[in-house]
Amino acid sequence: MSTAKYHLSSVTASYGRVLGVAIDELTIADGGFYVLTGPNGSGKSTLLSILAFLIRPAKGIVHFDGVPVSWSSKESIRLRRRVTLLHQQPYLFSGSVADNVAFGPRVRGAGKEEIRAVVSECLQRVGLEGFENRMARKLSGGESRRVAFARALACKPEVLLLDEPEAHVDRASAALLESLVASLAADGMTIVMSTHNELLGERLGAKAIHLEDGKLAGAQQLYFDQVPHLAGGIYANS
């Protein structure tokens, strides 16, 4: 029986008079791998920001690990430490690649040896071993995206949210990122990845969440096994 990492109920978010999302019911399984699709303006980035606890919905309830989110400042900060959102155009700090990847562990109080080991492991996973002393802002677009991915992994998140990770990168980098995401999903990390490529989910074996005008496409809402504490949860699935 699956357990729920997220459950959204009657969640809406808007930007002034412009609707961001309006989701009746959505459950994302713990350890689930999802591809989030939809045209520009369909609400993909808004949904990812809600899942990352960066945007508080105007209405509705979000459960995380079976507990309703109160959205207090203290709770939001605590939950953000468990979730990492990699933006479509990630910002790299000035300084070395190692400094960028080490940011999360350093903020969380890791020791020097631990940080060094984490940086080395994460750069190896994204195919950038030996890049520690390179200047981050002098890298190519594909290399920069991979450094940002390594920085995300260094935080050891329970949930990884990816906003168009393959946009504007070379084929080699896209293939490496796809392989890495599939590997992380196989290891049991909860992953939601937005993309314009509707065939990507099928290729990677991910479930599909499709948005149209901020709403889940009706065909995507299918009933799965009941979720503990959230009986009758609705799963987005391909």
Image (cartoon, grey):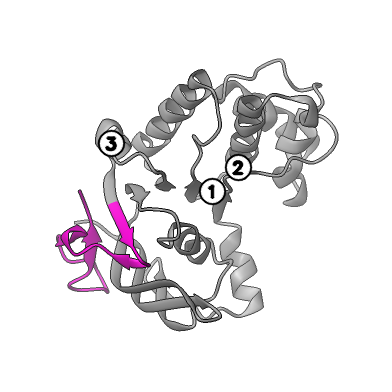
User: Which comes sooner in the sequence, label 2 or label 3?
Assistant: 2
Label 2 belongs to which residue?
152
Which class describes the residues within 10 Å of circle 3: few (<14), some (14-19), or many (20+)?
few
Question: Disc 3 on helix, strand or loop?
Answer: loop
Report x, y in % for residue 87: 58, 48
Label 3 belongs to which residue?
199
Q: Is residue 188 left or right of residue 139?
A: left
User: Which comes sooner in the sequence, label 2 or label 1?
Assistant: 2
Q: Nearer the viewer, mark 3 or mark 1?
A: 3
Question: Disc 1 on helix, strand or loop?
Answer: loop
Report how far apart the C-alphas of labels 2 and 3 lie in the structure.
25 Å
Residue type beneath disc 2: Ala
Report x, y in % for residue 104: 70, 46
Report x, y in % for residue 6: 37, 64
Residue located at (35% from left, 72% from top): 8
Q: Is residue 16 left or right of residue 215?
A: right
- Toward the bottom, the furthest residue is 59
Cβ atoms under marks 2 and 1 closer than 8 Å: yes
Report x, y in % for residue 36: 36, 51
Q: Is residue 51 placed above or below 158 in the rendered structure?
A: below
Is 173 contained in the magenta span? no
Image quadrant where residue 78 sits: bottom right
Residue located at (76% from left, 23% from top): 132
Report how far apart the C-alphas of labels 3 and 1 lie in the structure.
26 Å
Label 1 belongs to which residue?
157
Q: Is residue 144 placed above or below 89 in the rendered structure?
A: above
Front position in the image: 185 or 43: 43
The magenta stretch is: 209-238
Residue type beneath disc 3: Leu
Q: Is residue 82 left or right of residue 61?
A: right
Which class describes the residues within 10 Å of circle 1: few (<14), some (14-19), or many (20+)?
some
